[in-house]
Image: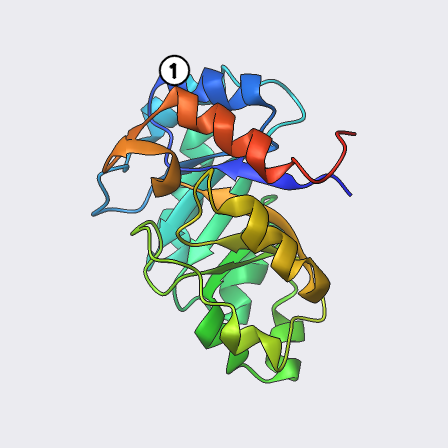
Amino acid sequence: MRTWVKICGLSTPETVDAAVAAGADAVGFVLAPGSPRTVGPATVRELRARVPEGIETVGVFRGQGVGEVLDLARASSISTVQLHGDESLDDVAAVQAAGFRVIRAVSAARYAGEAEEARAAFREDALLLDAVEPGAGAVFDARPLLAAPPARDWLLAGGLTPDTVGELLASLRSVGAVGVDVSSGVESSRGVKDVGLIAEFVAAARRDVPAA
């Protein structure tokens, strides 16, 4: 199966174009405050216009109320909302009811502590398992998942780079990892994306899987 790849934290036309040219399945824009990658909805809307149909456009939110999330998502013209935080079942359902796909992002350690009933109840469109501090480049720790892996396919994030993504992804395919999400691992400095690293990352993530 072809590895799903998202390049996140994009903020310039050049890096959006690089992600598209490399064959990314999704591009992400940080709409949460406090990150060096944060952009406003007007910027996202301009960058969104460069993305061809068929490539998912994702707004990343963290610890924001549902009303704010929906206002920013609509103003940005994105297709998908990625939630990092303590959003409830009702919050996820409200975002979906507004017409957006939802990626629920949670640390692997926290997810490992969720009861199976709680996991199933969220009904998110996609599950992303991350390091404890998203976007900080911390390496993903798979150990909490091995005893009780997800019952569904999931996306891997946390400290991925072109040099590490292939080996880590291969080691986790048996417990459901089908895609990857990268931000800091394709940067030349914090918050600054590198077009060469973007291309290298996508190629490395798919090296062991034939293209569709």
Q: What is the three-letter code of the residue carrying label 1? A: Pro
Q: SS at mark 1?
A: helix
Q: Is residue 88 above or below residue 168?
A: below
Residue in view at x 40 percent, y 41 percent: 71
Residue 31's x, y, as percent?
34, 41
Horizontal side, residue 138 vs residue 79: left or right: left
Q: Which residue is mark 1?
A: 13
Residue in view at x 52 percent, y 46 percent: 165
Q: Is residue 103 above or below residue 89?
A: above
In the image, 31 versus 106, the foreground residue is: 106
* Quadrant, the C terminus: top right
Horizontal side, residue 109 vs residue 12: left or right: right
* Quadrant, the N terminus: top right
Residue in view at x 38 percent, y 30 percent: 10
Q: Determine which quarter of the picture holds residue 131.
A: bottom left
Residue in view at x 41 percent, y 28 percent: 197
Report crowding for label 1: few under 14, some 14 to 19, many 20 or more residues within 10 A (C-alpha): some
Residue 205's x, y, as percent?
59, 39
Count of numbered marks: 1
Decide if residue 9 is in sight here: yes
